[in-house]
Structure formats: C-alpha cells, structure tokens
Image (spheres, rainbow, N blue to C red):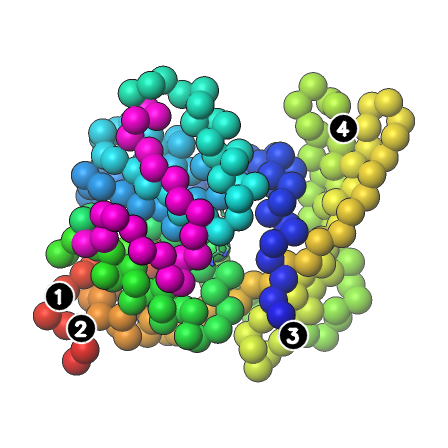
Amino acid sequence: MPNHLGEYYERVSDYDLEYQGQSEQDIPFWRELVMRYTPRRVLELACGSGRISLELLHGPGDFLLEGLDIAPEMLDAYRRKLAREPEAVQRRVILHEADMCDYELAHKGQFDLIFLPFNSVAHLYEIEQQLATFKNTYDHLAEYGRFVVDIFLPDIDYLSDALNRPSQVYLEDEIAAPGDKFTMLLYTTRKYDTIEQLQHITWVHEKFYEEGENERYLTMLDLHMFFPRELQLLFLAAGFGIEAIYGGYDWQPLGRGTRQIVVGRKRPSVRGL
Ligand SMILES: C[S@@+](CC[C@H](N)C(=O)[O-])C[C@H]1O[C@@H](n2cnc3c(N)ncnc32)[C@H](O)[C@@H]1O
C-alpha cells in the first residue's frame, strides 16, 4: 500500500494555524541549540513553511541557511513569508524542493549543522529511505558537523488504542482563526500496523465560518514509529557518533520527557567500520 503524506501538507494555512502552539515549545530549544553550536552554514531538512527556521534567522547568529522540502505548497508559503523579511535576512536563505532521501546540494560537505525537527523523520517509511537520508546527510556535513533529529517517543498506550480501537474518533483540537473568521475542529482516527511500525492517521478538518457556512475535508497521514534504539542505530549505521540524546525541549535526558532528540556528530574515520 502506498504511504499517505501529500494532501495533508497541501493546505498550508491550516497547517500553520494548527501548529502555531508548537512554536512556543520547540523554537526556544532550536534557538538555544544554535547559540551553543554557533554554526556558519545550516540546513533544515523538511523545512515546511518555515515555522522554525524563519524564526531562527532573527537571531542569535548570522549563519547561512538552506531549507529543503518535498512539498511545493509548503515552500511557496515559506517564500511568501521570506519576501516580507528585510533584505539582509532574505540574502541568507536558499530553499530547495527535493526529497531528503536523495538530495544533492552545491554546498555538500560544508554544513556544520543539519537538523530534521518536529517528527518529519517519521515520513521516511522504508528502511532504504531512512538509511539513504542518514548517509546522504552525513555526506553533506562538514567534518565534525552535527545532525540533530527530533521526534516524539512512541507512547505504548496510544499505540495500543490505535491497534485495538481503530474506529475510535478523537477530538484533537479546537482552534479559533485570527479575527474569529472561523473555528476549526480537528478529529482523528488512528490505526497501528505493528509489522510496518506504521501509524495510519485519518484527519477530519471541520471549519465553521462566521457567515454561517461550513466546510469539511478528510486527509490521510502515515507516520513511521521510531523506537529509541532503532533511531540510534540509524545514526550509527550512517557513521555518526552519538553526542547527546535529549528527552524534551527542556534538555532533560532521554526517558524523562515525551521526545527523543538525537545529536549525531560526523566522525569521518568511523564510516564503513
Ligand atoms: C511535520 S511537517 C514539519 C515542517 C516544519 N519543519 C515544521 O516544523 O513546521 C513535515 C514536513 O516534511 C516534509 N516531507 C515529508 N517527506 C519528505 C521528504 N521525503 N523529503 C523532504 N521533505 C519531506 C513535508 O512536506 C512537510 O513539510
């Protein structure tokens, strides 16, 4: 069965509305990370509409930034936001429409920080895609450069519900659009495939406009569940040394929070052993 991904990311303004709350949680972490590592050349894989990296451009640091995403709609939204930034900020950014499995950038070997934030690694469904992404990213880093991947920690109770009660409907959120133009309700059903380690999510977005009209649409989204050892093995298989693993955006150790944020470091001599 082909994996579902595309349609969910075609309605970018709904995506931006849905995840504006996420920015309060993860952007301070990425800002602090940039302060600690002081990179010169940064690449965000699966950059989407620029939710994170556009904010990072406002400081600290004056690094050059490249963003890569497979969805043209997301990149168009990123470009529209970038066009509203000062010239000096715009000059620091290059965007690429590409697949993170097989990208090939002019600055290959020159990035000192590549990051793959907010669960996007879960869109790598096959082992071959995962290995290709990690190895290719290794090759795009400068010596001793870092690759940082952020994804949620699989929750066994959640997966058990998805396995045993796939017809259960969850109300995920109720969001008021700016200016009260509409209210958006978000529902999901989830089905878990234990062999493929895939969570199949069906999203229903329902919008109630102030004029009294309403709209509903349905999208499917598949996510690969990464268990901690599996994610770490991917780093090791691609040649990285693991420098740190954090359990949340407050830098606590793995296991104390709901996330797994792995910092891999390029060690040229390790590859192939
Ligand atoms: C959860 S969004 C994250 C976007 C952004 N980083 C953020 O935090 O808002 C996942 C993004 O991954 C992108 N994506 C999925 N598969 C991809 C692939 N194989 N290569 C590049 N981008 C991909 C999608 O188009 C989408 O923009």
Q: Is residue 27 magenta?
A: no
- Between marks 1 and 4, how big is the CA–CA gap? 53 Å
- Ranked by sequence position, the earlier of labels 1 and 4 is 4
**Residue at figure coordinates x 53%, y 44% from the top left:** 72
- Element assignment for label 1: loop
| Residue segment shown in magenta | 89-109
Q: Residue at x 35, y 25 (%)?
A: 90
* Residue at position x 56%, y 63% in the image: 223
- Among the two numbered marks 1 and 3 on one chain, the one whose residue lies closer to the N terminus: 3
Task: Confirm or deny contact between disc 1 and disc 2 (CB under 8 A).
Answer: yes
Which residue does the numbered mark 3 point to in the structure image? 1
Residue annotated with mark 4? 182
Task: Sort mark 1 into few (<14), some (14-19) or many (20+) by Cα contacts within 10 Å.
Answer: some
Q: Give the quadrant of the C terminus.
A: bottom left
Kindly report which numbered mark, 2 or 4, lies closer to the viewer in this rendering.
2
Residue 107 is inside the magenta segment: yes
